[in-house]
Amino acid sequence: MFVATPGLSPRQKAAVVVRMMLADGAELELAQLPAEIQALLAQEMAGMDLVDRATCNEILTEFCDQLEQIGVAFPGSIDGTLDFLGDRLSSDTANRLRRLAALNGSADPWDRVSALTSPQLADLARGEAVEVAAVMFSRLPVARASQVFGLLDPAHARQIAYAMSLTGGIEAPALRRIGMALMRAIDALPQPAIDTRPVEKVGAILNFAPATTRDTVLAGLDQDDAEFAGRVRKAIFTWANIARRIDLRDIPRIVREVDAVTLSKAMAGATGDNAATAEFILSGLSSRLAETMREDIEALGRVTAKDAEEAMTAVVTVIRRMEQAGELFLIVESEDDEVTIRSAETG
């Protein structure tokens, strides 16, 4: 806390630091502060006028001196601590600690709800009243909620969507009670020893397997269990799926995240069915950028199949990372799309 600079209170000095950092373009997560602290900060800033440069410099110097005296900082909450420890704790231990923290009021039960996988959230929505499920969806990020909606029966999803229009007036105590009720429902969900479902696990493995291996395994699965094979195909996301499952408007953002040389190699080596994906990517760019990329592809010349496949896998990895971070979501293919695709592959 600031004490040395005369004339301004500690709160006013904090307001000066925040004001100068925001002026310099700093991204401050003020919403993470307790509500009363946010209110006090806003009140102090509203009551201040001008502060001379010398005083500002003195306050910043004092602030930096105090920062340099800090040896180590802890998260300050059970949620922050569990996020910091990450995979160093077992999932059972982390879940138990989150539950205990929510029960004693030191953590938000909705943090644990949001930490569930999309299939688990879908199971939760199916087992709860439509109104409760609507509140849950209202608390989820849009991209995540869209994924879970895609796993529900369309009629059930429609009921939940309508019920969401009635959730705007829920007050904080009721919201917390609903979150606690969902936590108890979470504890009742099956807890398999292996977290990842078989379809998702096989799909994730085949995502990064060589194309020949992937095709051979899928062909074998078609003979052994056609229904399981179809579900695995839906879980797979490869270079060939980009044109069908990526919104064209997301292409510029994806291109910015991918190494330029890697993307050029992938597109230069995209032949046969894979060539459609290269054209799809180019169609999502401005004409000038697309022309520059065509020139880069031409300059590369011939790319070996191995290098092309590695580059395509790298592009897919970036898309998967963005999807898991909620920066984009994949288009869910319908059953008719799947039948058409498989007919084209076998025809």
Image (cartoon, rainbow, N blue to C red):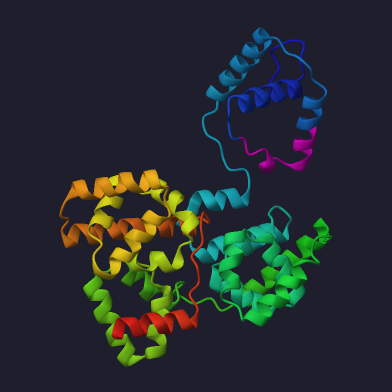
Along the line of sight, the residue nearer the viewer: 73 or 204? 204
Prevailing SS of the magenta stretch? helix
Tell whether 252 sits left or right of 34. left
Q: Position of residue 154 (x, y in %)?
A: 63, 80
* Rendered image quadrant of residue 41: top right
Looking at the rendered image, the quarter that the C terminus falls into is bottom left
Along the line of sight, the residue nearer the viewer: 116 or 52? 52
Q: Quick check: 287 above or below 104?
A: above
Q: Which residue is drawn at 37% across and 44% down?
A: 289
Q: Residue at x 25, y 71 (%)?
A: 211
User: Does the magenta segment cover residue 30?
Assistant: yes
* Rendered image quadrant of residue 97: bottom right
Q: Position of residue 8 (x, y in %)?
A: 76, 15
User: Does the magenta segment cover residue 177?
Assistant: no
Q: Position of residue 263 (x, y in %)?
A: 30, 51
Q: Quick check: 169 above or below 181?
A: above
Q: Which residue is drawn at 38% across and 60% down?
A: 280
Along the line of sight, the residue nearer the viewer: 72 or 42? 42
Mark yes or no: residue 33 visible. Answer: yes
Q: Residue at x 53, y 56 (%)?
A: 326
Along the line of sight, the residue nearer the viewer: 31 or 208? 208
Mark yes or no: residue 259 visible. Answer: no
Tell whether 156 sits left or right of 315. right
Q: Position of residue 327 (x, y in %)?
A: 51, 54
Q: Quick check: 114 above or below 222?
A: above
Looking at the rendering, the stretch of residues picked out in magenta corresponds to 28-40
